[in-house]
Image: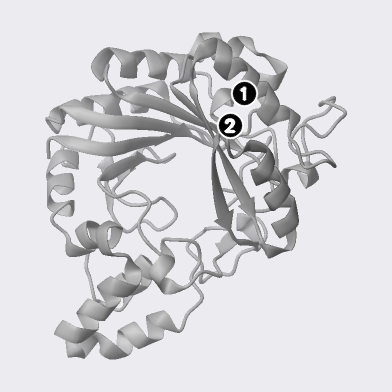
Amino acid sequence: MKSLNSVVFQVTRKCNLTCPHCFFCAGPSKREELTLRQATAALNDLRSLGIKKIDKFIITGGEPTLWPFLSELIGSIRKLFSKAKIRIDTNGVNFFINPGLFDKLGADIYNISIDSFHNKASVAKNFLDRDIFLNKNCSSPLVDFFIKNQVRFGFGLSARWTSNRRDDQIFSNFFKEYSKKINIERKLVTATGRGRSLPATSTGSGYLIGERPENFTCLMGDSLLLALDGCWYGCYHPASLTKLDKAGGSHVVDKFKKLVKSPLYGDLPRLGLLNVLNNIAKNKPEHRLAIKKILARKYWYRCQPCEDLCKEKVFKL
């Protein structure tokens, strides 16, 4: 493999919000985070894979601006993969408080988590005394602030709106206000509570998706994620389906090369879940009953269908 679409670093579970839909159960009291040594070892792994081109690095959390090594990681990425774009997924609070972060970090893209859940999230003491995420007019002081700085620093800007059907009108007004100024992604979910309140049958995520199976597709594609445990994953984190090895481990490269040949890893991003399942049912009748069971379930976030496929021994990763 000579290129990757994206590399994701999940650097910390610490956050200055406690949003009810957070499937990582992030918050102010969390202490789990990557070490700088793990991050450096991960960059060396990427070099060992012989990858010449990485489209973008995505740095996420928790809230990544609370991770003490963020600027060092960005500097190392710039040095080793100079043509890659760097995106920071953030709730934007620390930028609002300290605009100097734009100059210090210099990311190419900021992806703001902005939605109606945030105003109900508890925040640190002595926080701002007004709704910066979304006000009564369905406009966002936080988004306005980022747009203002976008002109100055020239970064790309997007917003990920996590919502359910109850705020259709609010989202409609927000979209009308900002759709010509920034990229907006809407993620339709039902907030089921934070990770600690989920049933034992879930893989650790915090969303119950109401979408139809044909809408399920892998978000990662030809990508890698370095999770908080310091391990590389070849699919999204909550389900440890494609755990490769610890960053810097001797088998990471070999395991990844085998992973990209997996039909599930290769077909799911390209075809979508429903087409993958229909093809299996058509070509391998022995799996029809298992697939019928999978289609009858309500899936937890995006990893559960793959978890089911592996448990039913339709695929082995």
The answer to whether 228 is drawn above or below residue 283 in the figure is: above
The answer to whether 236 is drawn above or below residue 134 in the figure is: below
Specify the quadrant of the image occupied by residue 163. bottom right
Label 1: element kind: helix
Quadrant in which the C terminus appears: bottom left
In space, the residues marked 1 and 2 are separated at their CA atoms by: 8 Å
> Of marks 1 and 2, which one's residue comes earlier in the chain?
1
Q: Name the residue located 52 percent from the left edge and 12 percent from the top edge.
A: 153
Circles 1 and 2: CB atoms closer than 8 Å: yes
Label 2: element kind: loop
Mark 2 = which residue?
A: 181
Amino acid beneath label 1: Ile
Looking at the image, which is closer to me, 247 or 298?
Answer: 298
- In the drawing, does residue 233 fall left or right of residue 114? left
Q: Which mark is residue 147?
A: 1
Q: Name the residue located 20 percent from the left edge and 89 percent from the top edge.
A: 286
- In the drawing, does residue 45 fall left or right of residue 158? left
Quadrant in which the N terminus appears: top left
Q: Where residue 209 sits: x, y (%)?
A: 54, 66
